[in-house]
């Protein structure tokens, strides 16, 4: 059999590349004659640059940028031909904030990444959005690229109180916002109300923080703040759209770059996976995108996940034939202590059911 292995990261434990390697190791243990095609995936969040580098090659450039609280953090951008790819989470990810102080956290370092890509000669810069710990509406990014205002743009959302004027810079490259998030910047379904709690914003502070982004939206461009994707990554989507970026679904961009459709047609079975497989996976997550591609190729898709939190009906609505849980197989303690070994064991078990050997 020909098996396409196309997982996302297992957040906090395995990168997508490591997850694909672990699945392959377990599968080969059970079915050594099967032909495996490893295709790590990403949707714009953590792992975006690594996955694209594995698929596209190109040159990785190491830079140091400002972290969410002003500290220097290492980051990497990928230059592949005239296009540069940057990963916003490297500069403002929730792993850097610890899920705290979102009102003070800045996206300035993301703007520095974009500036570094411009300095490297890129003609187009694709910004992967996802996994952010910030909620400043992209004000920090704007500041790093030369925007000026009557309030500090690099002090997180808290610094925006009273802002009435923002003069946007001219950016000499094409910008692309790679995100599957459809939320507007503000309001009931905006960045703050939807994603603020997971970034540590207390319930009672959500209306006030949303109000700060409303002030930013009024000062920059109210219409842009209502566009789909403006609320991505705590409003980074809004800043990029205001600078003229076009929005592309992250999973589709990565799928095209790695040739997912072609590779699915060449396979007999498609495997995908992520840390938690639940119904939110439908919102632009890797397993849903991979399953949709498998369905178009008329190939079955099976998911391996840390936890499976959907029933069989919901699973099939997501386009997945079967889903298998790491925690159910080895227990939570071992799943976190030895994620690669545990995932390999799960893959071997799945191979016993799905391989023809």
Image (cartoon, rainbow, N blue to C red):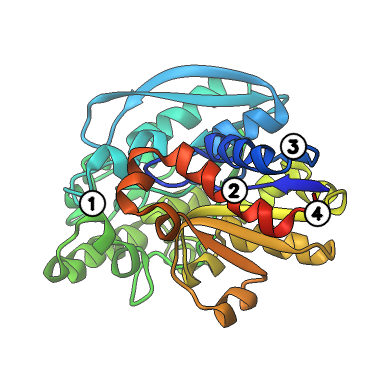
Q: CA distance from mark 3 to mark 1?
A: 54 Å
List x then y, in percent, for residue 260. Answer: 76, 48
Q: Is residue 318 above or below residue 103?
A: below
Q: Residues within 10 Å of mark 4 (few under 14, many from 20)?
A: few
Asked whether residue 304 is in view, the answer is yes
Name the residue carrying label 3: 32
Camera-side residue of 69 and 37: 37
Task: Give the camera-side residue of 73 and 141.
Answer: 73
Q: Which mark lies nearer to you, 2 or 4?
A: 4
| Lower sequence index among marks 4 and 3 | 3
Residue 204 spot, x, y in % from top left: 12, 70
C-alpha span from label 2 to label 1: 44 Å
Mark 4 against mark 1, which lies toward the viewer?
4
Q: Which residue is mark 2?
A: 347
Which residue lies under the disc numbered 1? 157
Residue at position x 78%, y 44% in the image: 259
Under circle 3, the secondary element is: loop
Contact? badges 4 and 3 (CB < 8 Å) = no
Q: Single out the mark in the foreground, 3 or 1.
A: 3
Of the two numbered discs 2 and 1 on the same chain, state the one appearing first in sequence.
1
Image-quadrant location for residue 186: bottom left
- Please tell me which of labels 2 and 4 falls first in the chain: 2
Residue at the location (70% across, 32% down)?
55
Query: CA gap, disc 2 to disc 4?
Result: 14 Å
Pick the residue in front: 58 or 356. Answer: 356
Residue under pointer 4:
356
**How many neighbours does mark 2 have within 10 angstroms: few (below 14), some (14-19), or many (20 or more)?**
many
Provide the secondary structure element on which disc 2 rests.
helix
Real-space CA distance between mark 4 and mark 1, rounded to the nearest whole angstrom: 56 Å
**Can residue 169 be seen?**
no
């Amino acid at each position: 059999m020909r098996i396409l292995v196309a997982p996302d990261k297992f957040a906090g434990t395995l990168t997508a590349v490591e997850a694909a390697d672990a699945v392959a190791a377990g599968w080969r243990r059970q079915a050594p004659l099967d032909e495996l095609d490893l295709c790590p995936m990403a949707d714009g969040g953590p792992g975006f640059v690594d996955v694209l580098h594995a698929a596209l090659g190109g040159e990785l450039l190491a830079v140091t940028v400002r972290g969410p609280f002003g500290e220097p953090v290492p980051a990497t951008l990928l230059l592949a031909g005239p296009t540069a790819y940057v990963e916003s989470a490297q500069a403002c990810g929730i792993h850097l904030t610890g899920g705290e102080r979102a009102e003070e956290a800045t996206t300035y370092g993301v703007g520095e990444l974009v500036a570094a890509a411009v300095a490297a000669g890129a003609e187009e810069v694709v910004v992967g959005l996802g996994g952010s710990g910030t909620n400043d509406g992209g004000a920090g990014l704007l500041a790093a690229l030369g925007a000026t205002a009557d309030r500090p743009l690099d002090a997180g959302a808290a610094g925006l109180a009273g802002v009435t004027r923002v003069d946007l810079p001219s950016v000499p490259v094409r910008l692309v916002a790679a995100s599957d998030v459809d939320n507007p910047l503000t309001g009931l379904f905006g960045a703050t109300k939807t994603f603020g709690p997971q970034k540590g914003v207390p319930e009672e502070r959500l209306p006030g923080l949303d109000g700060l982004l409303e002030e930013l939206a009024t000062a920059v461009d109210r219409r842009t703040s209502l566009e789909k994707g403006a609320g991505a990554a705590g409003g980074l989507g809004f800043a990029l759209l205001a600078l003229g970026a076009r929005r592309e679904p992250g999973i589709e961009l990565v799928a095209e770059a790695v040739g997912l459709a072609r590779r699915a047609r060449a396979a007999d079975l498609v495997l995908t996976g992520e840390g938690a497989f639940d119904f939110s996976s439908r919102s632009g997550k890797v397993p849903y995108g991979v399953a949709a591609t498998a369905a178009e190729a008329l190939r079955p898709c099976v998911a391996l996940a840390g936890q499976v939190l959907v029933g069989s009906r919901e699973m099939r609505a997501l386009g997945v034939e079967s889903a298998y849980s790491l925690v159910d197989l080895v227990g939570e303690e071992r799943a976190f202590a030895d994620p690669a070994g545990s995932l390999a064991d799960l893959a071997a078990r799945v191979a016993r059911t799905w391989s023809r050997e």
